[in-house]
Image: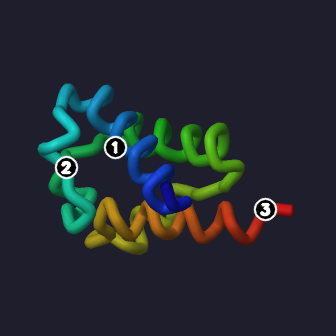
Amino acid sequence: MSQYETVYEKVCEMICDAKDMEMDELSAEMPLHQLKLDSLDYVELMVLAKREFSVTIDAEMFTKNPEMTLGELCQHLADQQQKSAP
């Protein structure tokens, strides 16, 4: 499984838990705003990124990129994780 696929799976699991959704309801092309995430959900995403991938993301990333898709978020996390890997 690629780094992106690992990140995508973990992020989707978190969103499914938070929003009571099924994995097949999500797609990489789906804009985050379509998921109706609230501020707590974004905080959970930031905590997940730090805990699972050792990547720090801030709220500004979400506000500056309102059309960001789920796939773009996961690609960003995978890229940042790869950059910080020893």
Q: Residue at x 51, y 61 (%)?
A: 2
Q: Which kind of residue does numbered mark 1 sit on?
A: Cys
Quick check: 57 above or below 69?
A: above
Q: Residue at x 31, y 27 (%)?
A: 17
Quarter holding the C terminus? bottom right
- Which of 11 and 6 lies nearest the eye of the viewer? 6
Kindly report the distance in space between the C-alpha atoms of the residues bearing marks 3 and 2: 28 Å
Figure label count: 3
Crowd band around label 3 with a 10 angstrom C-alpha radius: few (<14), some (14–19), many (20+): few
Crowd band around label 1 with a 10 angstrom C-alpha radius: few (<14), some (14–19), many (20+): many
- Circle 1 sits in a helix, a strand or a loop, which is it? helix
Q: Position of residue 50 (x, y in %)?
A: 65, 45
Residue 85, numbered circle: 3
Kindly report the distance in space between the C-alpha atoms of the residues bearing marks 1 and 2: 7 Å
Quick check: 8 above or below 41?
A: below
Q: Are marks 1 and 2 in contact (CB under 8 Å)?
A: yes
Q: Position of residue 29 (x, y in %)?
A: 21, 67
- Circle 2 sits in a helix, a strand or a loop, which is it? loop
Judging by the rendered image, the residue that carries numbered circle 1 is 12
Q: Are marks 3 and 2 in contact (CB under 8 Å)?
A: no
Q: Earlier in the sequence, mark 3 or mark 2?
A: 2
Q: Position of residue 34 (x, y in %)?
A: 16, 55
Kindly report the distance in space between the C-alpha atoms of the residues bearing marks 1 and 3: 23 Å
Q: Which kind of residue does numbered mark 3 sit on?
A: Ala
Residue 26, numbered circle: 2
